[in-house]
Image: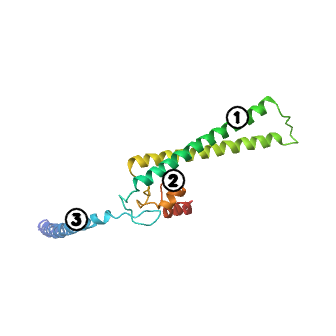
Amino acid sequence: AKKAAPAKKAAPAKKAAPAKKAAPAKKAAPAKKAAPAKAAPRKKTVICSLSGFEVMPGAPGLSPKTKDRLRAKLLEEKARLVHQADELVAEAEELARNREHGDTQFDEESGDGDTIAVERERDLLLSAQARHVVDEIDAALVRMKKGTYGVCSYAGRKIPLERLEAIPWADVCVDCKARAERRR
């Protein structure tokens, strides 16, 4: 008699509870699937993390005449910077050669050796900065070929012509650049 009573109580309780729990779980699942389907169109609106503006892919480009003028400006600036960088490296090498050959007397009291070392380091730093801008100019020329020149690489907005006139290798709009600088 003891075995029959516990078996009857345990069996109906277990069978009834899972059947009731399974039905609400199935009803909740379709409701969750419907929500992401509505959220999909919202994913098209992407907000730039730097500027806070909506990213606008396919922003209108520059006219061919304007692109040609800016391309010429980029190439002119590249040639100037490459020449400047080469001259700075040559000057730094000349300073090093003069110091090595002993053309100038260096002693600890005069500090001439330190001055020349500082000038050499300055020349090498300025040369590296010029070469960095040359790399940015090369990237701008590649963007021109791809058709993405003049479009902010973060927000996808058109970079104002005034900014491109001032810094033709710019790849971000003023708002994104300002926010990036503030984050530093």
| Left/right of residue 88 with respect to residue 183 in the rendered view | right
Residue sitting nearer the eye, 5 or 70: 70
Label disc, if present, on residue 93 of the rendered structure: 1
Nearer the camera: disc 2 or disc 1? 2
Query: What's the residue type where badge 1 is placed?
Result: Glu
Residue 129 is situated, as x and y percent measured from the top left of the image, at 61, 47
Q: Residue furthest right?
A: 109
Provide the residue designation for mark 2.
Answer: 168
The crowd level at tag 3 (other Cα within 10 Å; few <14, some 14-19, many 20+) is few
Marked residue nearer the N-terminal end (2 or 1): 1
Marked residue nearer the N-terminal end (2 or 3): 3
Nearer the camera: disc 2 or disc 3? 2
Residue at 48% from the left image edge and 57% from the top image edge: 172
- Gap between marks 2 and 3, in whole Å? 48 Å
Provide the residue designation for mark 3.
Answer: 33
Query: What's the residue type where badge 3 is placed?
Result: Lys
- Kindly state the secondary structure of the residue where label 2 is placed: loop
Residue 131 is situated, as x and y percent measured from the top left of the image, at 58, 43
Residue sitting nearer the eye, 128 or 146: 146
Nearer the camera: disc 3 or disc 1? 1
Q: Quadrant of the C terminus?
A: bottom right
Query: What's the residue type where badge 2 is placed?
Result: Pro
Residue at 46% from the left image edge and 46% from the top image edge: 141
- Gap between marks 3 and 1, in whole Å? 68 Å
